[in-house]
Image: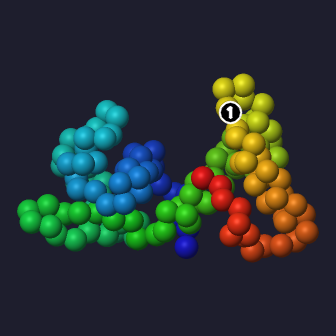
Amino acid sequence: MTLPAKLSRREREIMDLVFALNQATLGEILDRMEDPPTRPALRSILTILETKGHLQHRKSGREFVYAATHEKKGAGRSALRRVLDVFFGGSLQDAVAAHLADPGEKIAPAELAALEKLVAQAAQGQTKKDPSIALP
């Protein structure tokens, strides 16, 4: 299951933090946000994310601990689709070309070999990921 693309910038920022931390309290989220909102405003956004079905919480002592209701991998696919659509007109080729053309990016030979193998599998119509290919 993937996350719908209909999240505000602030909601996406919060979801990114929750995914990075696996679970987080309101205080942990506030501490890691750039230009954080007030505690009551963040509490409201967390409630909205719960209402939308993106977060769930459990009580731990006096605090709520928030966790994503969707898998990180599915959310990553959804985020990648958004980036491809918004910045590259939906073209994976253009996105990969932009990444490879960036002189600041250093791609390890092993990663390039793994990517070549994935491209070859895709060209052959194989949809299963080969477990011997390890990408970060």
Q: Is residue 3 left or right of residue 101?
A: left
Q: Is residue 28 left or right of residue 111?
A: left
Residue at x 87% of width, y 61% of height: 120
Q: Is residue 11 visible?
A: no
Query: Splitting the image into 4 quarters, where does residue 10 fall?
Result: top left
Display coloring: rainbow
x, y percent for residue 63: 14, 61
x, y percent for residue 92: 77, 50
Residue at x 31% of width, y 54% of height: 45
Give the secondary structure at mark 1. Answer: loop
Q: Is residue 16 visible?
A: yes
Q: Nearer the viewer, residue 100 or 107?
A: 107
Q: Dot 1: within a 10 Å radius of its alpha carbon, few (fewer than 14), some, or many (20 or more) residues?
A: few
Q: Residue furthest right?
A: 124
| The N terminus sits in image quarter | bottom right
* Amino acid tagged 1: Lys
x, y percent for residue 79: 58, 54
Task: Tell me: residue 44, above or below residue 39.
Answer: below
Q: Is residue 75 left or right of residue 45?
A: right
Residue at x 72% of width, y 70% of height: 129
Task: Tell me: residue 129, above or below residue 120.
Answer: below
Instruction: Give the labeled residue for mark 1.
Output: 106
Task: Tell me: residue 100, above or below residue 68.
Answer: above
Q: Residue furthest left?
A: 62
Residue at x 68% of width, y 33% of height: 106
Q: Nearer the viewer, residue 10 or 71?
A: 71
